[in-house]
């Protein structure tokens, strides 16, 4: 994974943070290819488009499959999320935001051209979907094929070949069904041994060495109609990581499927999420801690879907608090709730929790605020010991005179 992973992986991309995984490799040996001409000819400076261009905006729901590779292995998954398309007033220029599922959340636009009959969009390859000036490289669009070969013992060979003959990717438009479909891509994640995943399609390549970051196939975007009130489907709360340092950080990995409880598509512009801990306690991203680095000027408890910043990503959020020290972030669980507001009508999902630790007992909660005066240890015969050894009875005496006893094994 490249140095500025966090820029691109606003994208989503903790490998564990993916829902509906169709296949997964725990490790792989990357096949080193000569750099693609799409990356060899990449400009030394890149001015990517991050502001929405002028024109008619149409929102689409993403579909298809994709493969994501990293130093930790590979994942294949179903594409999800939203694509935004702007049709310029000149009648032939088209701008597409987050053209690849891998890049969703970066907010980068690429430029394409609408055919005279309005039934196809051609997008020149070589455009960047992410770039970092500090490191001087990014992720560039290309076309190619990949085989994932099972080597046994949890090792996979990711064999990727860029096709430099292809200079543009073509999307066909079906006005009747309101869909846009990538042409000439194909793939399968159900192949006879030793090929685990074979695919041809649109790729994202690292511009410094031409290695593949992601490939998509079967991509179909479905036009979203006017937003109507709906109850969002529950989010998936996947993983919680604690850096283990009192002044460190924690992160939460999750997945939000942009559908309601009946499976109908939601418009992400109306969707927010909130974080809860323990007994439904609402977490506040206070301005003093998070504001300057994430571009908001007040405390926030509802985060817009896809909100960008140093700590907010499409399927991950970071916190400047851990569960170490005297001010833990929570006692045993952390969760998320979605809010969908259209035409003044607000509906919420359930609060979905991830139990990170065992729930404290009533005695634990009662004694949590007490100060310890003395701790003594006894063996099973009732003899006092200087230190616990083996099966030990630990007797804790508090300053208010109360005591507790617990069995411990050392």
Image (tube, grey):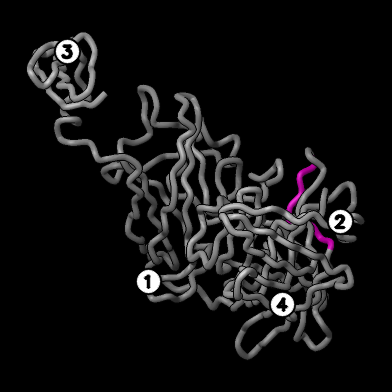
Q: Measured along the vertical axis of the image, is residue 292 above or below residue 72?
A: above
* Disc 1 packing (10 Å; few <14; some 14–19; many ≥20): few
> Which residue is at 69% across, 60% downward?
214
> Which residue is at 73% across, 73% downward?
200
- Depth check: 216 or 392 in front? 392
Q: Measured along the vertical axis of the image, is residue 1 above or below residue 374?
A: below
Residue stretch in magenta:
126-133
Q: Nearer the viewer, mark 4 or mark 1?
A: 4
Alpha carbon distance from label 2 to label 1: 45 Å
Q: Main secondary structure of the magenta part?
A: strand
Q: Residue furthest right?
A: 41
Give the labeled residue for mark 3: 376
Q: Mark 1 near mark 3, Cβ–Cβ under 8 Å?
A: no
Give the labeled residue for mark 2: 35
Give the labeled residue for mark 4: 185
For the C terminus, which image quadrant? top left
Alpha carbon distance from label 3 to label 2: 67 Å
Decide if residue 164 is in sight here. yes
Q: Nearer the viewer, mark 2 or mark 1?
A: 2
Q: Earlier in the sequence, mark 1 or mark 3?
A: 1
């Amino acid at each position: 994974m490249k140095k500025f992973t966090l820029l691109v992986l606003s994208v989503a991309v903790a490998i564990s943070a993916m829902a509906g995984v169709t296949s997964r490799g725990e490790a792989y040996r990357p096949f080193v290819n000569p750099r693609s001409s799409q990356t060899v000819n990449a400009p030394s400076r890149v001015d990517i488009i991050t502001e929405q261009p002028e024109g008619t905006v149409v929102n689409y729901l993403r579909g298809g499959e994709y493969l994501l590779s990293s130093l930790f292995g590979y994942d294949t998954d179903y594409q999800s999320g939203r694509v935004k398309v702007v049709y310029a007033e000149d009648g032939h220029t088209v701008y597409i935001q987050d053209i690849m599922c891998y890049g969703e959340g970066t907010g980068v636009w690429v430029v394409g051209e609408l055919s005279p009959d309005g039934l196809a969009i051609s997008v020149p390859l070589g455009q960047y979907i992410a770039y970092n000036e500090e490191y001087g490289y990014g992720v560039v669009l290309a076309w190619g094929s990949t085989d994932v070969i099972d080597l046994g013992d949890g090792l996979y060979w990711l064999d990727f070949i860029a096709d430099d003959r292809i200079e543009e990717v073509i999307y066909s438009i079906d006005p009747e069904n309101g869909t846009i479909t990538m042409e000439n891509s194909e793939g399968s994640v159900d192949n006879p041994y030793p090929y685990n995943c074979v695919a041809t399609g649109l790729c994202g390549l690292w511009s410094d060495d031409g290695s593949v970051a992601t490939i998509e196939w079967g991509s179909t975007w479905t036009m979203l109609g006017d937003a109507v009130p709906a109850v969002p489907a529950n989010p998936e709360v996947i993983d919680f990581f604690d850096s283990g340092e009192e002044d460190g950080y924690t992160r939460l990995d999750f997945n939000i499927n942009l559908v309601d409880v009946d499976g109908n598509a939601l418009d992400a512009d109306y969707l927010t999420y909130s974080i809860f801990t323990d007994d439904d306690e609402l977490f506040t991203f206070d301005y003093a801690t998070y504001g300057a680095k994430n571009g908001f000027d007040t405390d926030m408890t509802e985060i817009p879907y896809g909100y960008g910043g140093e700590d907010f990503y499409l399927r991950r959020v970071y916190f400047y608090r851990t569960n170490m020290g005297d001010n833990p972030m929570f006692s045993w669980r952390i969760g998320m709730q979605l809010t969908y507001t259209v035409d003044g009508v607000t509906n919420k999902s359930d609060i979905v929790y991830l139990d990170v630790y065992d729930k404290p007992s009533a005695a634990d909660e009662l004694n949590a605020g007490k100060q310890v005066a003395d701790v003594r240890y006894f063996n099973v015969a009732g003899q006092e010991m200087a230190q616990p050894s083996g099966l030990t009875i630990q007797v804790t005496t508090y300053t208010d005179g109360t005591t507790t006893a617990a069995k411990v094994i050392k």
